Amino acid sequence: DQQVKQNSPSLSVQEGRISILNCDYTNSMFDYFLWYKKYPAEGPTFLISISSIKDKNEDGRFTVFLNKSAKHLSLHIVPSQPGDSAVYFCAATNRYNNNDMRFGAGTRLTVKP
Amino acid sequence: NAGVTQTPKFRILKIGQSMTLQCTQDMNHNYMYWYRQDPGMGLKLIYYSVGAGITDKGEVPNGYNVSRSTTEDFPLRLELAAPSQTSVYFCASSYSTRGPRTDTQYFGPGTRLTVL
């Protein structure tokens, strides 16, 4: 079963505008969430994370928001740059099993110049 | 410092053949992981290791075996390849006493495996 869902397979935005990538989860045991970025022919690279004790975490142009009641998180990229074009994966871990990380299917972001 | 390296990059197997996917990291990380990514899907954990001599099953371990005799190496063995094992395989490592929940995982570039 898909416990982490990214319902938008792709997103296209103009350079300089905001990109918003969404992620939903079903398992209430998840308490730590991560975003990874992946370029073609490379492995994923860690981008930003958030613990369930917070509702926002910011790192430069990247901000992750967590809405626990809705079991929803989002990644905001402001301003978007062409180099941000990649596949973004949302992932979540279980408080009872640190190594059980579940990934969403990914959203392909294209930032147009 | 090469990070996480995986070999081969590509491989085509016939049904029933066996092979070993190699993974090496030079960051002295204690945790290592194997994931597979099927088309249109997220990564799924196959096996992981918290240190040399210690391995454990992930979400999708069937059809695979692993060993961890050194800190650096974590090979993944497919004994009887099946078409369902056609996927991209990623190895990752992290330095952690708590697993991936708060520690950055570093991924290799992946091995694309096709079983015909």
Image (cartoon, rainbow, N blue to C red):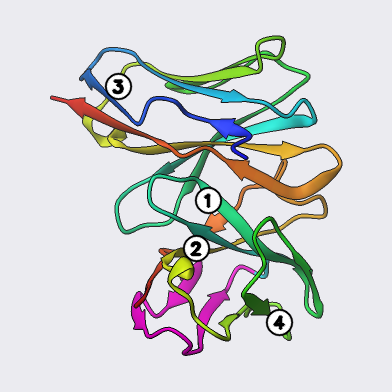
What amino acid is at disc 3?
Ser
What amino acid is at disc 4?
Ser
Q: CA distance from mark 2 to mark 1?
A: 8 Å
A81 in relation to A35, above or below: above
Query: CB under 8 Å between callouts 2 and 1?
Result: yes
The label nearer to you, 2 versus 1, is 1
Specify the farthest residue to the right: A96
Left or right, B67 with reference to A73: right
B47 in relation to A66, above or below: below
> Where does label 1 land, which residue?
B43
* Residue situated in front as seen by the camera: A71 or B80: B80
Q: Position of residue A54 (x, y in %)?
A: 72, 16
Tell which subunit mark 1 falls on.
Answer: B
Q: Position of residue B76 (x, y in %)?
A: 59, 78
Give the residue drawn at x 62%, y 74%.
B63
* Residue situated in front as seen by the camera: A77 or A21: A21
Q: What residue span does the magenta drawing correspond to?
A: B1-27
Query: CB under 8 Å between callouts 3 and 2?
Result: no
Quadrant where the C terminus of chain B sits is bottom left
Q: Callout 3: helix, strand or loop?
A: loop
Tell which subunit mark 3 falls on.
Answer: A
**Residue B20 falls inside the magenta stretch:** yes
What amino acid is at disc 2?
Phe
The label nearer to you, 4 versus 3, is 4
Give the residue drawn at x 48%, y 87%.
B16
Q: CA distance from mark 4 to mark 3?
A: 42 Å
What amino acid is at disc 1?
Leu
Give the residue drawn at x 65%, y 31%.
A33
Mark closest to the chain's N terminus, 2 or 1 = 1
The part of the image, by quadrant, that contains residue A88 is: top left
Q: Residue B67 bears which disc, if any?
A: 4
